[in-house]
Image (cartoon, helix red, strand yellow):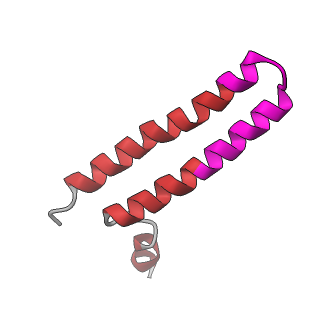
């Protein structure tokens, strides 16, 4: 039973990977908007806003790379 539940959290194909990356991207932009609102009028808020999507780009590359390597299964 635990094995069946754990399979729900495994990314099996590229479509699922892109959906996860899309969700991460939406969340990071929302967090970036909060940074800009919190630090309005400063460069620091915009720098934090820029760093949030960069983290998603790096995580997305890792997710896609791992899905491509495991396509043969």
The image shows residue 31, relative to residue 51, as above or below, that is below
The residue lying at 55 percent from left, 51 percent from top is: 24
Residue pictured at 47% horizontal, 62% vertical: 19
Q: Magenta region, mostly helix, strand or loop?
A: helix
Q: Magenta span covers which residues?
A: 26-47
Where 14 sits versus 58, above or below? below
Left or right for 18, reference 73: right
Residue displayed at 66% across by 22% down? 47
In which quarter of the view is residue 41 placed? top right
Tell me, yes or no, whether the highlighted magenta stretch contains residue 4.
Answer: no
Q: Quadrant of the C terminus?
A: bottom left
Along the line of sight, which residue is nearer the eye, 1 or 31?
A: 31
Find the residue positioned furthest to the front.
Answer: 41
User: Which residue is depicted at the point 76% across and 33% down?
Assistant: 35
Using the rendered view, name the quadrant where residue 4 is placed.
bottom left
Residue 31 point in image, percent of width and height? 70, 41
């Amino acid at each position: 039973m635990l094995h069946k539940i754990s399979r729900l959290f495994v990314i099996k194909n590229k479509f699922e990977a892109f959906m996860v990356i899309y969700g991460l991207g939406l969340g990071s932009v929302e967090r970036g908007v909060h940074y800009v609102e919190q630090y309005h009028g400063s460069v620091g808020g915009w720098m934090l806003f820029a760093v949030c999507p960069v983290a998603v780009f790096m995580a997305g590359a890792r997710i896609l790379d791992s899905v491509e390597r495991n396509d043969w299964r």
